Amino acid sequence: MAQNRIEGAGGRSYLAIPGPSVMPEAVLQAMHRAAPNIYGGELIEMMPGLVSGLRDVARTRGHVAIYIGNGHAAWEAALANVVAPGDAVLVPATGRFGHGWGDMAAGLGAEVQVIDFGKSAPWDLDRIAETLRGDGAHRIKAVLAVHVDTSSSVRNDVAGLRKVLDDLGHPALLMADCIASLGCDRFEMDAWGVDVMVTGCQKGLMVPPGMAFVFFNDRAAGVRAKMARVSRYWDWTPRAEPTEFWQYFDGTAPTHHLYGLRTALGMIADEGIEAIWARHERLARAIWAACEAWGAEGPLKLNVADPAHRSRAVTALRIGAPHGTALRAWVEGNLGLTLGIGLGMAPPDDPAWHGFFRLGHMGHVNGQMVLGMLGGIEAGLTALGLPHGKGGLEAAARVIAGGA
Ligand SMILES: *Cc1c(COP(=O)(O)O)cnc(C)c1O
């Protein structure tokens, strides 16, 4: 089995799941060092540069708090600063992650209202507007908005949601989960009027899992200031305006991750965020072109019908049970290519669960990797005798070549 092998006698493996993503060698090398001094020197001096690099990626002049944690930690951190027990929050859910963030708010004592848009459709802004209009007393304090839902690969219109809130004069905070989209899909925190944004380091930011980020604007800081209490560890205030180095992290710094992040942010700055969005766009279009060609005959289907509502970093596919699991097993065992499991599309104990899979194409990915992945999938479809339309690779190559 090629599982968990980065490089072996049989060649280099490829982990094409939607997070953790492929880690650049330069990031790993930057982390491979003796423990640095945390009381003086380089680590402390590099912090302002990291904060400014993070703001650039998020397109904000606002604040950022850094935590040792994963995306779930970022969810809880953001909520802990602005949502008190008994507060109402609205969750327009387009897959599993919206429900997950809502659950976490419920765990903190919030009253959670979910509008469920199913597993393949984006937000319907009119329906969200209707719900907000019904909240004349402005009890809803925040809207928990997942930009890209990694389970369904639905991409939502965050700027459109801001317009809905503004048009209604509704004061709810707009809180965005960009864990799967930051550094992949266009996202503009300030221009889109996002008050709070959460992300992790292990997807578009290309650093091993372990750091979480909460960005917030002055409006959100004002809401935080009115909270009766905020759990001490999650409080974003000292982290965003530290007077001592340890306050960035409320304790020991994630020393090696910071070195990895410095290198990753440098790579992002060198390529340019606009160019990075364009690269993800082109690679995603190549993947869709292949999948559409294969799907012309046989069971393979893209989960999201309209390209405008598809993530540029993850693609969810339906192929019917048990073919999703069979295909993943074949490409992993024979080619060293690991594809993502279907997430949240069916319960894990339901045989239908085996009918889904996902492709991760976030962060450190280029055309040869995507063409290799697609070639692997085509080989798997062929080996398993699964009917599929012809010309998938050709269609993808055309997009990569710039002709489509
Ligand atoms: C990955 C992901 C999460 C969860 O992040 P973890 O690091 O696994 O806790 C939450 N939301 C979205 C959109 C994600 O892609």
Image: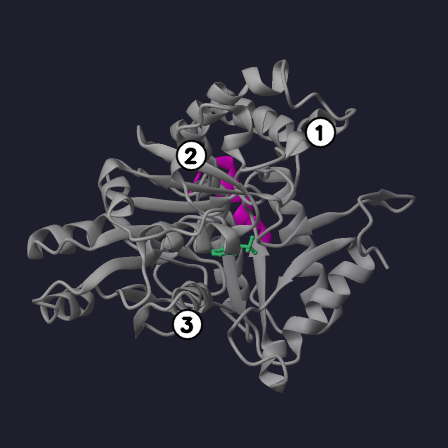
- Let me know if residue 393 is in the magenta part: yes
SS under mark 2: helix
- Identify the mark nearer the N-term, 2 or 3: 3
Q: In front: 253, or 123?
A: 253
Badge 2: residue crowd in 10 Å (few <14, some 14–19, many ≥20):
some
Badge 1: residue crowd in 10 Å (few <14, some 14–19, many ≥20):
many
- Identify the mark nearer the N-term, 3 or 1: 1
Q: Are marks 2 and 3 in contact (CB under 8 Å)?
A: no
Q: Residue at x 45, y 55 (%)?
A: 76
Residue 181 — which label?
none
Q: Residue at x 55, y 75 (%)?
A: 299
- Identify the mark nearer the N-term, 1 or 2: 1
Residue 391 visible in rendering: no
- Residue 343, relative to residue 167: is it above or below? below
Q: Disc 3 to disc 1, how far (Cα)?
A: 38 Å
Callout 2 amino acid: Pro
Q: Residue at x 15, y 54 (%)?
A: 165
Quarter of the image for the N terminus: give it: bottom right
What residue span does the magenta drawing correspond to? 392-404
Residue 238 — which label?
2
- Residue 30, relative to residue 322: is it above or below? above
Q: Residue at x 57, y 53 (%)?
A: 18
**Residue farthest to the right, as pictured:** 9
Say which residue label 3 marks.
119
Say which residue label 1 marks.
31
Badge 3: residue crowd in 10 Å (few <14, some 14–19, many ≥20):
some
Q: Where, by quadrant of the figure, is residue 366 drawn?
A: top right
Can you tell which of label 1 and label 2 is closer to the viewer?
2
Callout 3 amino acid: Lys
Q: Disc 2 to disc 3, how far (Cα)?
A: 39 Å
Can you tell which of label 2 and label 3 is closer to the viewer?
2
